[in-house]
Image (cartoon, rainbow, N blue to C red):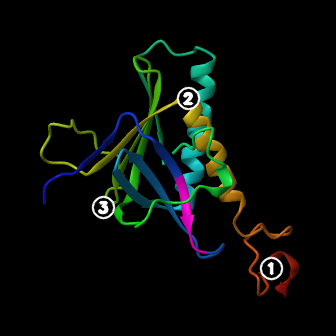
Amino acid sequence: MSRRLFIFDEPDRFVPATVGPPGGRAFFLQARQGRTVVTVGLEKAQVIVLAERMSELLTVVDEGATDDTSMAILAAGPAHEDEPEAGIGLDEPVVEAFRVGAMALSWDQASDRVVIEAQPQDESGEYIEATDQDEDGPDVMRVRIERDDARAFVRRARSLVAAGRPPCPFCGEPLEATGHFCLQQGGQLN
């Protein structure tokens, strides 16, 4: 099977989104540029880390602390200002191109954009560097977004995570609608 490159240099949209009810949600990243739509699946923890690292990167960039063309920060889509964050869903049909294993996050000073790269899961769990011309290597989804879109992505990701099941005030584990067996409370059902 030949390597697939999904490159979005000027996406119309790049969003984190979920499908399913809290406790049973599947997390996705979806990029759209024109009529091209690509969706990749990932874990909630990866969304959290990506949002945290993106926020850190934006802070550094906004402070002007980088002189390099590309500052890489390893990590695990932005809503445009006119889109209500809570109402953003996935373009359908949702077809998962691959399940994300490794991601990289960088700043491209020349284009003044945040660059997100995602690769599929493999045995190593490592990010594999390969040029676009390499015939061998993992599939890649690469998205370049402007600062405002990156900020909207962070807000959206944080909102998605917060919309999940509330944590138990005693042990921090997610509360189920049917109750929760809390070890901190001596195994009582809360």
In which quadrant of the rendered image does the C terminus lie? bottom right
The reply to whether discs 2 and 3 touch (Cβ–Cβ < 8 Å) is no
Please state which amino acid type lies under the numbered disc 3.
Answer: Glu
Question: Earlier along the polypeptide chain: callout 1 or callout 3?
Answer: 3
Q: Which residue is mark 2?
A: 147
Residues packed near mark 2 inside 10 Å, few (<14), some (14 to 19) or many (20 plus): some
Residues packed near mark 1 inside 10 Å, few (<14), some (14 to 19) or many (20 plus): some
Residue 93 at x, y percent in the picture: 40, 67
State the residue at coordinates (12%, 45%). 135
Cα distance between the residues tagged 1 and 3: 35 Å
Q: Which residue is mark 1?
A: 182
Cα distance between the residues tagged 2 and 1: 42 Å
Q: Which residue is mark 3?
A: 123
Given residues 131 and 40, the one toward you in this image is 40
The reply to whether discs 1 and 3 touch (Cβ–Cβ < 8 Å) is no
Cα distance between the residues tagged 2 and 3: 33 Å
State the residue at coordinates (86%, 67%). 169
